[in-house]
Structure formats: structure tokens, C-alpha cells
Amino acid sequence: MKSLVWKKLSARQRAAALQRPAQAARPQVAAAVARIIADVRRHGDTALRRLTAKFDGARLSSLRVGAAEFAAAEKSLSAADRAALRTACRNLRRFHAAQQPAAVRVATMPGVVCEKVVRPVGRVGLYVPGGSAPLFSTALMLGVPSQLAGNPVRVLCTPPGRDGRVSPWILQAARLCGITEVFKLGGAQAIAALAYGTASVPKCDKLFGPGNAFVTEAKLQVSRDAAGAAIDLPAGPSEVMVIADNSAEPAFVAADLLSQAEHGPDSQVVLVAFSEKFAARVRTALARQLAALPRAAVAQRALAASRVLLAASTDEAAAIANAYAPEHLILQVKSPRALLPLITTSGSVFLGAWTPESLGDYASGTNHVLPTYGWARACSGLGLTDFQRTMTVQEASPRGLRRLGPVVERLALAENLAAHQRAVRVRLDALKK
């Protein structure tokens, strides 16, 4: 991990230091994704089977997971495994249930009442990454809030292994959330199927879930198409920033950096430290821990694009974090609560030495579907209300129309919208009669 002294960098150098490496390949990714989406729209299930064989090495007779596969998945997990899933599910339910929005009803003036009511999104598509590391935890992160929101149709897609099977952990997590429609589909082709529908896969109104660069690009493309689907947020390859002062334990910092680096070669890890001496201790711990990781080769590739940024103060460290807007931000400093008010842009923040990012990934109760690529400047992490939509309602009584109508008439005529004024006037005239 190369060290850069922040105060010595120019504005251009600072921007380069915070650049996400995966963005460099976006034009090629966008073109490839567009071809996949067009293929799925044109050829439906036939394209899905062909693309699954091509990208996942699995030849499927059925795209949908059957009841026997759900039953087999449950039997394959130990009682302790199932208990761990239930604990994670329970914590997620507690945190997300507390996010239920209250209905709003306000009399803005006598005779005029305005309301906001909540409704579930009708059909939601849930994408759970698979491949070399099936993220069953994502099935819980999407399944729990969608269940609490009461979405009538919930469809989950996840890539199969070469044997054509879905991870039993994913299927058991889906079952805990009451999801029965699970399809063996991954990548951009899964997003296309959920957005436009096929003979097998129901068309969805809104898509959820993280993924690699291809999945993220596919979500962005279908969200720009009126015939496609809305999306939750741009959640792409994982990233973490750790702010660590000299009081931090280097082994803890190294472990947190590696926990994200092992996700994939396009993951990014950034350390903000306050001295080169401490950074060197972290590098030593990284090398030692990396050697023992089963996914060392993947993590090593991610670390090749990582860096250490040396800050002169906690204020400067916070400014770096806000400029980067990380998906995950870990504050391993002596007084993390004191630093938290300075943080304005992050998907999720982890305070202190005893709060590894892994807690949020699995079972603390917060959602791990978070904005990446700097989208945390404008987007929030996933929550219950993302699976809902609100509608405003208004009702005026005759008394209310008499009081407010003349105001609206004047405003409508000021905008040269005579029909708007007339819609009020015909009613006021009727009341006079």
C-alpha cells in the first residue's frame, strides 16, 4: 500500500488518490451489458439459459428453484448454522421494523386536509451475488425489509454453481424471509430478466441488491428505460476506508482492510493514518494475515490498487473521508464518537476497535446494501422505506374551497394557466348557487 501525504498533494493528485479503479473499464462494460440486455429482451428464457451456460458453466433444465431444492438446502445445514441465520434475521427485523414511517395528516387551513399514506412497491426483484462467494447475507438484507414492507411479489435471482445448484445458505435465508420465487440467474442477464420479464421470470417494478461492475451497469441501464425498472441505488464492488490513529491495533486495521479486499479484485481499500510508522505496522500485519487467507490471490489484487493517505489531523481525516464518500467507514481512533459529527458522507459507519465491518455485513441489524463509487454523497444505504412508496392525499370541504380557491385562482392566472383557474371558479360559482 503506497503512502501519500495528503497536504502535499495537488487538487488533481487528491482526486486521483480517491479514484475508484473499476471505473476505468466502464465504457467496455456498458457496451457488453447493453448487448446482454438486448439479447434477453429479444430471446427471453432461451437467452437466459445460453448466457448462464456461458458465464456460469451451468446448463439448466429449469431456471426456477423447486420445492425439493429448498428442502434439501435446509437439511444440508447444521442446527448451529440455521440458528446463526435466525439470529441475523431477528436483528435485521428489529432494526428495520423500527423504520416504519408514520402516516401524516395535517389540516393546513380550516377545511383543507393533506395526508401522506404509505404503500408497498408492487413487484420487487432481489439480486443476490453468487459466484466464488455466495452472499447469503444479502438474501437476508433484501428479504427482511421486503417482507416487512409487504411487497406482494418478491423475486430473487442468484447465479448457480457449475453443478446448477444454488447455495443452500442462500435458499435457507430466502426461506426465512418467506421468499419462494428464486431463479438461478446471475449477472446482467438476471437484471434484464427482472426488469423486463420473461416467460419464467416475472417483470418487477423495482430492483434491489449489490453486484459487480456488470450488475451495477445493468441496473443503471434498465433504470434509464421507461420500459425497464427502478433501482435501489448504485451498489457495486465493495470498498472500505479505515481512519486509524496511533492508538489503534494494527492487526485489527489489517483485518478490516482484508475483509473487504477478499470480496473481489475490483474492491478498494483505503487507510487514512496519521504517521508513516503506524502505516508500516499495518503493512506488516497485512502481509502476515494475507498469507493465511484462502482468498489471498483475490485480496492481493485488490490491495494492489489500495493506498495509505497520511492526514495531519482528525479534521483533515474527516475531510478525506467526506471527499471519498466510502461505502464502509471504520473509525478506529481513540474517541470515535467525537469524530462522528464531522462525517457527512458514508454508507455505514463503524465506531471503535470492537466494531468490525463484518458485524454490519451479517448480523448487527443494519443493512449492508450500501452506495459505492462515491454515491454516498447523495444516496443512503438500503432501508425499509426503499421497499415502499408514499402518496399524498388532499381533501377540501366547501368551506375550505371558499377560503383557498381565490388564492389558487390568482396564482393560476399569474402563470397564464386559465384552465387551472377555471377548475376552481366553476366550483366556487356552484357554491354560490
Image (cartoon, rainbow, N blue to C red):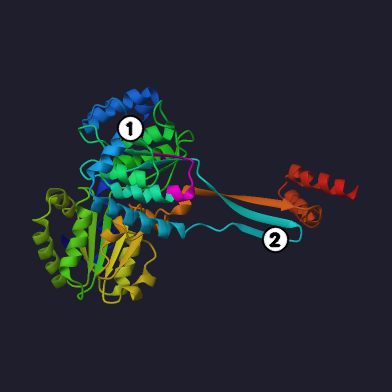
Report the residue at 70% width, 61% height from top: 108
Percent of width and height locating residue 12:
28, 58
Residue 62, image x and y in percent? 31, 27
Q: Number of marks in the image?
A: 2
Label 1 environment density (alpha carbons within 10 Å; few <14, some 14–19, many ≥20)? few
Q: Is residue 212 visible?
A: no
**One can see residue 153 in this view:** yes
- Identity, as a three-letter code, of the amino acid under mark 2: Thr
Q: Nearer the viewer, mark 1 or mark 2?
A: 1
Image quadrant where one finds the N terminus = bottom left
Q: Residue at label 2?
A: 108
Residue 150 is a magenta residue: yes
Task: Quadrant for residue 110, please give it.
Answer: bottom right
Looking at the image, which residue is at 23% across and 40% down? 131
Q: Which residues are magenta?
A: 146-155
Q: Amino acid at mark 1?
A: Gly
* Local SS, label 1: loop
Residue occupied by mark 1: 66
Q: Position of residue 317 (x, y in %)?
A: 29, 69
Give how far across and how far down residue 430 sits, in percent.
86, 45
Disc 1 to disc 2, C-alpha distance? 53 Å
Q: Looking at the image, is mark 1 or mark 2 earlier in the sequence?
A: 1
| Element carrying mark 2 | strand
